Image (spheres, rainbow, N blue to C red):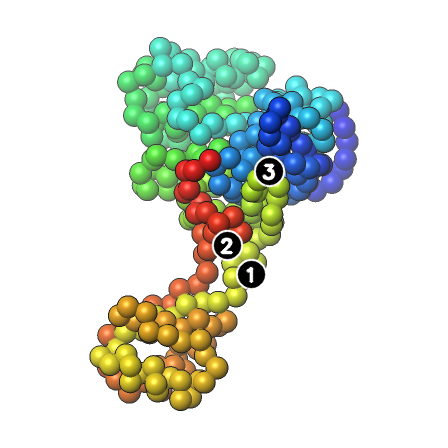
């Protein structure tokens, strides 16, 4: 066991993975604080899964190291495994469809060394949390994908991990189910000061992260809070449609000669640093009837696109 006595749940140090014809992860370094939600974003093929597999001791690094919950993935992989939980991207991957929900959870508890009494104490509370208490005696194979995902979350929580690794945990689920799953996760995270390491293709999930790292071509290209990352784009976008866009744009330019303003399609489009303060000023000089107004701030999708040239949902390798 390696003591570091820091505030970090993860310390990743020049982690590298080389294959015969590819460097999948190249000297990646970052820290994750205890109790935070850390987002790990990147296009397919960027190195996300390879990194997670190394952090979870499923894949041996070529070089570098990571200290997770004070355990080295090189020197003490068993210590790492005992203190983490992992929800794979593919739903149902870790469940036995021939066993009941209770039996699946019991098997996982025994693998992590829980006594029968410890299992009984935790079972109902966790089952109630993720709303599967009425399904405990059902065979997993007959349940829906959303229910299976809830069971998988219950499974990884049963041994009370310090860090929860979530590899696109809500992919393929409807919006209502996604929101419900995050309700469970938020509750457990806050109650236990749990650290969550998340990969996702949903912008609203990335937005809830305390910090985000974007990886591309095996390297970390940026890392910061969602708000600070969005601020790197600099420009808000104002879209206004009036009864006479040509007249309105001339009015705007007569007062704000340096403003970046054009007509695009049916709208007057304005790029500006502070859209919230500029919008009322622009509306004051327009004499034509305004038909529609939109103010759009930069999104994480914009940041991602600018840095990687691809959208978060890009499926191309």
Q: Are marks 2 and 1 in contact (CB under 8 Å)?
A: yes
Q: Which SS class for mark 1?
A: loop
What residue did someone put label 3 on?
218
Q: At which x and y percent is residue 80?
A: 65, 25
Residue at 33% x, 21% y: name it: 135
Q: Who is closer to the viewer here, 21 or 93?
A: 21
Residue at 60% x, 27% y: name it: 21
Label 2 or label 1, whichever comes before in sequence order: 1
Residue at 40% x, 64% y: name it: 296
Q: Quadrant of residue 266?
A: bottom left
Q: Is residue 36 left or right of residue 7?
A: left
Disc 2 residue crowd, few under 14, some 14–19, many 20+, Cα 10 Å: few
Residue 232, numbered circle: 1
Q: Which SS class for mark 2?
A: helix
- Between the C-alphas of marks 1 and 3, the distance is 22 Å
Q: Who is closer to the viewer here, 86 or 139?
A: 86
Q: Who is closer to the viewer here, 315 or 85?
A: 315
Q: Is residue 19 left or right of residue 237?
A: right
Q: At which x and y percent is residue 20?
A: 62, 24
What residue did someone put label 2 on?
306
Q: Is residue 160 visible?
A: no
For the residues carrying marks 2 and 1, which lies nearer the camera in this image?
2
Q: Are marks 1 and 3 in contact (CB under 8 Å)?
A: no
- Between the C-alphas of marks 2 and 3, the distance is 17 Å
Label 1 or label 3, whichever comes before in sequence order: 3
* Number of numbered labels in the structure image: 3
Residue at 40% x, 84% y: name it: 253
Q: Who is closer to the viewer here, 155 or 207?
A: 207
For the residues carrying marks 1 and 3, which lies nearer the camera in this image?
3
Q: Quadrant of residue 295?
A: bottom left
Quadrant of the frame with the N terminus: top right
């Amino acid at each position: 066991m390696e003591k570091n006595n820091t505030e970090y749940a993860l310390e990743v140090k020049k982690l590298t993975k080389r294959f015969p014809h590819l460097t999948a992860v190249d000297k990646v370094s970052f820290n994750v604080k205890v109790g935070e939600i850390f987002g790990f974003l990147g296009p397919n093929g960027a190195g996300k899964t390879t990194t997670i597999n190394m952090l979870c001791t499923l894949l041996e690094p070529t070089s570098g190291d990571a200290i997770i919950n004070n355990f080295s993935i090189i020197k003490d992989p068993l210590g790492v495994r005992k203190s983490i939980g992992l929800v794979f991207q593919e739903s149902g991957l870790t469940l036995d469809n021939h066993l009941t929900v209770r039996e699946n959870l019991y098997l996982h508890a025994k693998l992590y060394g829980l006594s029968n009494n410890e299992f009984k104490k935790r079972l109902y509370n966790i089952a109630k949390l993720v709303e599967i208490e009425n399904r405990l005696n059902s065979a997993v194979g007959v349940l829906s994908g959303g229910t299976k995902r809830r069971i998988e979350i219950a499974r990884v929580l049963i041994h009370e991990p310090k860090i929860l690794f979530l590899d696109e945990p809500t992919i393929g689920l409807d919006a209502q189910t996604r929101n419900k799953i995050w309700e469970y996760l938020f509750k457990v995270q806050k109650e236990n000061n749990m650290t969550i390491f998340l990969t996702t293709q949903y912008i609203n999930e990335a937005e809830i992260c305390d910090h985000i790292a974007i990886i591309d071509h095996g390297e970390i290209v940026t890392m910061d809070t969602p708000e600070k990352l969005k601020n790197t784009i600099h420009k808000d976008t104002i879209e206004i449609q009036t009864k006479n866009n040509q007249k309105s744009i001339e009015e705007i330019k007569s007062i704000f000669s340096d403003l970046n303003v054009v007509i695009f399609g049916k709208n007057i489009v304005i790029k500006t640093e502070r859209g919230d303060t500029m919008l009322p000023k622009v509306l004051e000089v327009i004499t034509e009837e305004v038909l529609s107004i939109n103010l759009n701030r930069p999104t994480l999708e914009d940041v991602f696109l600018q840095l990687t040239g691809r959208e978060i949902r890009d499926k191309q390798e």
